[in-house]
Amino acid sequence: MNDHGGDEESSRPYFFLSYAHTPRAGARGAGDPNHWVRQLYRDLCEAVLQLTTVPAGVPVGFMDESMHQGELWAERLAEELATCRVFVPLYSPRYFNSVPCGQEWYSFTRRPVYPANFDSERTSGIVPVLWAPMSRYRLPEVASELQFNHASFGPDYATEGLYALMKLSYFRGAYELAVHRLARRIVEVAEETVIPVGRRLDFNSQPSAFNVTAPTKRLRISVLAYHRGDVPPERNPDYYGEKRTDWHPFRPAAPRPLAEHAVRLARQLGFQATVHEFDGEAEEIIGGGEPTAPGLLLLDRWVLKDERWRELVRRFDRADCGWVSVLEPWNMDDPDCAEQHREMGDLSDQALRFTHRAARPSFLGATGGQPGLGSLEEFDDALPRAAMKAKYAFESRTRTEPEEPPPPRPNLRDAFRHGRGRDGPGLPAHDDHPREAGDRPDDGTPFGGGTT
């Protein structure tokens, strides 16, 4: 075994178990659909522990059980993906449709991989697992490029997948063999590669490695709000964070950033959502180039008191960016908002004059007008409509117009069916065939013969 050296190296988890969270089936009280993944994780940890010198108290692996929610969840994932030694994805149809799983894969593969020895051929820190059979599915390119022999885990595993081996007592022996060999493979990869600890990435901003999402299924969520360093004296700074994307207008009911909440809602609609600061990409949106994806602008009306931001919003409004919907949260339980809602509503109407007038994808509230989205529930109701309208506008703008079709060729069968003459469908209105001697003019018989 190779000596990686140092307490820091020995404290790194051997593996990160990446899996698609399965929703509960049916009514309340249904069993935990991720129970079997947890059992696999425990069995793998025990098996890896037996094959290594991991000290007591040091985590062997990591498995996310947070259901992809909250700022702390994203920070913890970023930490584990930057430090784990092996990435273990559970292949299933649901896995490759999961945006968070694709983001986990992408984040891990930002780290370089070096063979531990001169004669080693190991160039990947990924050990895939067949959770379900995938022979009928096309794998994304990043997965299909991996050279991995699943047959070494046993014939039943390769045919049925690990989930079936766990569920059915008939396969108990096959399951134990597969887990043992999987644990051994994880340890081998950890020892035969050097994967330095990476940077802690902003997990929510990472793209999916699977790259199976069409542009219309992407969603760029932009935030224009204060950060804590530039909040004006008359505004409570507790609603802001270090970054503009940390804005959380509905606290304490929703203490986490609104952009994170929007990402979760967008994923429920099937979008691959990313979060950005609006001022960093406003020129690209306004500049008149072809958009790359539909978008949402989460607008904090308080920034409209600043002439610089007010002019930026005016320019956006005049640019007719219909593929970017505007959502304007305005928490009426916030004393500052309740006190100045009329003034700030007027500023919004002035800055977004064309957007409001044209009733494009701008969502002010349940009944429209100045109040804004007064609660998290109203925001939740408005976001799906806003996202879909932005998607439709994006599709309309980027759709390639078909060329003008050529005129249909004359069709004699259609022309003379049911006793129609030369002006019927399929024949030109003028006479392309002048009559010759012997033709009977105007006898009521269609040119060329009798009725059919």
Image: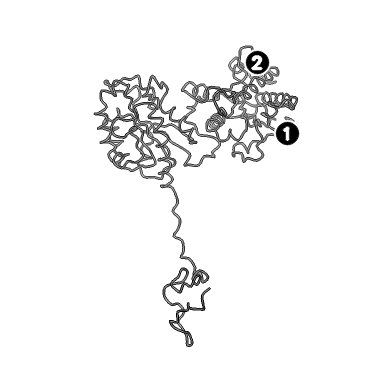
Q: Is residue 157 left or right of residue 351?
A: right
Query: What scheme was used to colour the molecule?
Result: one colour
Q: Is residue 207 left or right of residue 166?
A: left
Which is more N-terminal, label 1 or label 2?
2
State the CA–CA distance, disc 2 to disc 1.
28 Å
x, y (%) of residue 305? 26, 29
Compared with 429, 53 (above or below) is: above
Disc nearest the viewer among 2 and 1? 1
x, y (%) of residue 351? 27, 36
Q: Which mark is residue 151?
A: 1
Locate residue 157: give its quadrant: top right
* Residue drawn 66% across the image and 25% down it: 186
Q: Secondary structure at mark 1?
A: helix
Q: Which mark is residue 54?
A: 2
Q: Residue furthest top?
A: 56
* Residue drawn 31% across the image and 23% down it: 231
* Quarter of the rendering occupied by the N terminus: top right
Q: Is residue 102 left or right of residue 362?
A: right
From the viewer's side, name the closer residue of 225 and 387: 387
Q: Is residue 44 left or right of residue 339?
A: right
Q: Secondary structure at mark 2?
A: loop
* Residue drawn 50% across the image and 34% down it: 207
Disc 2 residue type (three-letter): Val
x, y (%) of residue 52? 68, 18
Compared with 173, 285 (above or below) is: below
Q: Residues within 10 Å of mark 2 (few under 14, many from 20)?
A: some
From the viewer's side, name the closer residue of 365 and 81: 365
Q: Residue furthest bottom?
A: 437
x, y (%) of residue 124? 63, 31
Q: Residues within 10 Å of mark 1 (few under 14, many from 20)?
A: few
Disc 1 residue type (three-letter): Ala
Q: How many marks?
A: 2
